[in-house]
């Protein structure tokens, strides 16, 4: 595709439900990042993949958060037993190479936990 | 974690004036810096970047200045237009982790 896409764009979950957020990066991009953005704040790093390898997951806030990228392209961020504090926009970004270089962001998934 | 902060949370400028948005970073090991623009309901959009071996980089109507001595980054927008109204973030990285500041909301007054 022309850019990074994410689905769903909006998700409402009841507290305790599991959710899965999908990211389709730009084709051929090696690196993929997940961020959490609270209202009025900057994005906060969650995790980083280089191809299918999850090289950094230090930003995941708890063991309820899990991310995968099994074939080195599409990635899924899963949140188990959602809590109200998980409400945020979840952004996915990809970049062509590894390490510090330009990231292209998707539109994000707005998660609201009731 | 590292912190990246902005001096001014909001900025209003007249259309046609120049805008300056400032950012302080804390990790002296960071070697790559990016400015992003984020409009409501959209993901951040790349504006301009700079590596630590440079102190100035210019793009179309935008200039980024990097002062490593005081760990300060600024974004200058020339002839600000209504379409420039958005939240602007600076981000720093030393490899795989990108740290974003809180953001400055720029409003352009017609």
Image: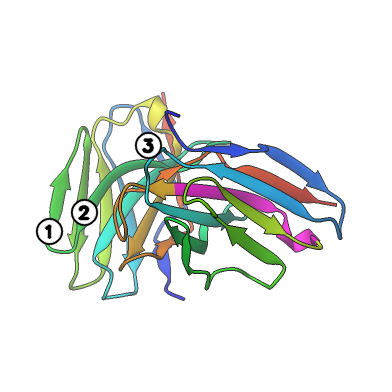
Please state which of residues B91 and B14 is positioned toward the viewer in this rendering: B91
Please say if the residues under marks 1 and 2 sit with CB atoms less than 8 Å apart: yes
Give the label on residue A59, or none: none
Measured in 3D between alpha carbons, the distance from the residue under mark 3 to the one under mark 2, in whole angstroms, is 25 Å
**Mark 2 highlights which residue?**
B50
Q: Secondary structure at mark 2?
A: strand
**Mark 3 highlights which residue?**
B13
Q: Are marks 3 and 2 on the same chain?
A: yes
3 or 2: mark nearer the eye: 2
Which percent across, then down, holds residue B5? 41, 64
Q: Earlier in the sequence, mark 3 or mark 2?
A: 3
Q: Which residues are magenta?
A: A82-93
Label 3 marks which chain's residue?
Answer: B
Label 1 crowd bin: few (<14), some (14–19), many (20+), radius 10 Å: few
Label 2 crowd bin: few (<14), some (14–19), many (20+), radius 10 Å: many
Quarter in which the C terminus of chain B is drawn = top left
């Amino acid at each position: 595709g022309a850019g990074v896409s994410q689905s769903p764009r909006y998700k409402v979950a009841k507290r305790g439900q599991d959710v899965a957020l999908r990211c389709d990066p730009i084709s051929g991009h090696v690196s993929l990042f997940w961020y959490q953005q609270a209202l009025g704040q900057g994005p906060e790093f969650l995790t980083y993949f280089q191809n299918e390898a999850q090289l950094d997951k230090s930003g995941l806030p708890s063991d309820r958060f899990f991310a995968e990228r099994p074939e080195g392209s599409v990635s899924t961020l899963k949140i188990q037993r959602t809590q109200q504090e998980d409400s945020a926009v979840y952004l996915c970004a990809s970049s062509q190479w590894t390490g510090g270089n330009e990231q292209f962001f998707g539109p994000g998934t707005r998660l609201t936990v009731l | 974690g590292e912190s990246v902060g902005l001096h001014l949370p909001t900025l209003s400028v007249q259309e046609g004036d120049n805008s300056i948005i400032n950012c302080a970073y804390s990790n002296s090991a960071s070697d790559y810096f990016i400015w992003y623009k984020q409009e409501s309901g959209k993901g951040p959009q790349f504006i301009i970047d700079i590596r630590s071996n440079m102190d100035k980089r210019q793009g179309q109507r935008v200039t980024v200045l990097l002062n490593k001595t005081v760990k300060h980054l600024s974004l200058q927008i020339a002839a600000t237009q209504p379409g420039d109204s958005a939240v602007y973030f600076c981000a720093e990285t030393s490899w795989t982790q990108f740290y974003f500041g809180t953001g400055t909301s720029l409003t352009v007054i017609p």
